[in-house]
Image (cartoon, helix red, strand yellow):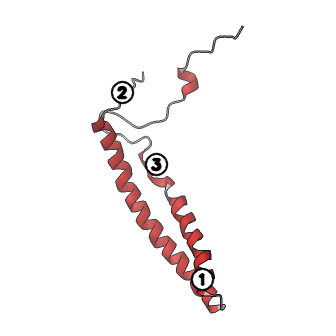
Amino acid sequence: MNNELEITWPRVLRVWWAYLWRSLIAMLVAMILGGIAGFIIGFCMGMAGVPTRTIQFVTAPIGALIGLGISIFPIKMILGKNFGKFRLVLVETSAAEPPALPQS
């Protein structure tokens, strides 16, 4: 039996904190991976004689894509997490909704 709990500030803060610190770690990882990728790509392009401005235009979106890709992990990590008196889970809405009445 699933009982939906009231959304209170203490519960919101617990979920927010769980998401925040995981997001900060993910951001750090994204910065490191983006820096490594940017360095390697920039070095290779620089050795090939590509202008610095072009290297920046190429590496900046790559870094953004790395960050975007990593940003999904904090959400995945808190879904299903036990917060003591509640868990953050996904519930199918179609099973919980009553059937629609036929239209006349």
Viewer-proximal residue among 51 and 76: 51
75 relative position to 9: left or right:
right
- Which of these two is toward me, 89 or 20? 20
93 sits left or right of 17 in the view: right
Residue 31, image quadrant = bottom left
The mark that comes first in sequence, 3 or 1, is 1
Instruction: Identify the residue at horizontal 31%, vertical 43% (top origin).
Output: 14
Q: Residues within 10 Å of mark 1 (few under 14, many from 20)?
A: few
Marker disc for residue 22: none
Q: Amino acid at mark 2?
A: Leu
- Is the C terminus in the top left, top right, bottom left or bottom right quadrant? top right
Q: Residue furthest front?
A: 53
Q: Secondary structure at mark 2?
A: loop
Task: Tell me the number on the disc at residue 75.
Answer: 3
Residue with the mark numbered 2 = 5
Q: Nearer the viewer, residue 86 or 98?
A: 98
Answer above or below: position of 25 versus 44: above
